[in-house]
Amino acid sequence: MIVFEVEGTPRPQGSKRHVGRGIMVESSKYVAEWRSWVRFCAATAFVGLQPLVGAVQVNVAFCFDRPQTHSTKKGLRPNAPEFKPTKPDIDKLLRAVLDAMTGVCFADDSQVVAIYCTKKFSRAAVTKVEVFNLSGD
């Protein structure tokens, strides 16, 4: 198992839009920098290791800053939610992370056969990633 964390607000990889002459642009202006940061953190965790071969499981916890409305002067409100049921979409967040990990953690994201993913509120914005080799290689 390889574990790493990526500090900062998770960014979604949405659709691309055509701007003419065959040029496609990401819908999010933040996703390229976010993918680079994820790739750097993954590469740091995989130092000296080759990308995994065969079946891979990825567990990801996207943690977002908790809004001030979730707290009072005495601390966290009892009804403050644990999970973030609002945008960005979890599948678009996951797409950005898996694309960034490709070539570092595994050769191709088609190797990912199992995913456990959550989107939560937290004290700090961070993405926690665990990568498992299911092939036993």
Image: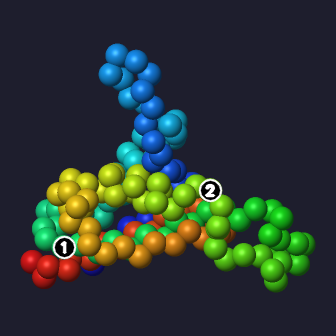
Secondary element under disc 2, as helix, strand or loop, is loop
Q: Position of residue 64 (x, y in %)?
A: 61, 62
Residue at 43%, 36% (x, y): give it.
16
Secondary element under disc 1, as helix, strand or loop, is loop
Q: How is the image coloured?
A: rainbow
- Vertical order, 36 against 112 (above or below): above
* Mark 1 residue type: Ala
Number of the label disc, if any, that sits on residue 55 = 1
* Mark 2 residue type: Lys
Residue at 52%, 50% (x, y): give it.
11
Residue at 40%, 18% (x, y): give it.
20
Asked where in the image residue 33 lies, by quadrant, the reply is top left
The 10 Å Cα crowd at callout 1, few under 14, some 14 to 19, many 20 or more, is some
Q: Is residue 137 visible?
A: yes
- State how far apart marks 1 and 2 are (Cα): 30 Å
Q: Is residue 6 visible?
A: no
- Vertical order, 21 against 113 (above or below): above
Number of the label disc, if any, that sits on residue 87 = 2
Residue 51 falls left or right of residue 66: left
Q: Quadrant of the N terminus?
A: bottom left
Q: Position of residue 50 (x, y in %)?
A: 14, 62
- Vertical order, 87 against 30 (above or below): below
Q: Position of residue 31 (x, y in %)?
A: 47, 43
Q: Quadrant of the C terminus?
A: bottom left
Q: How many marks?
A: 2
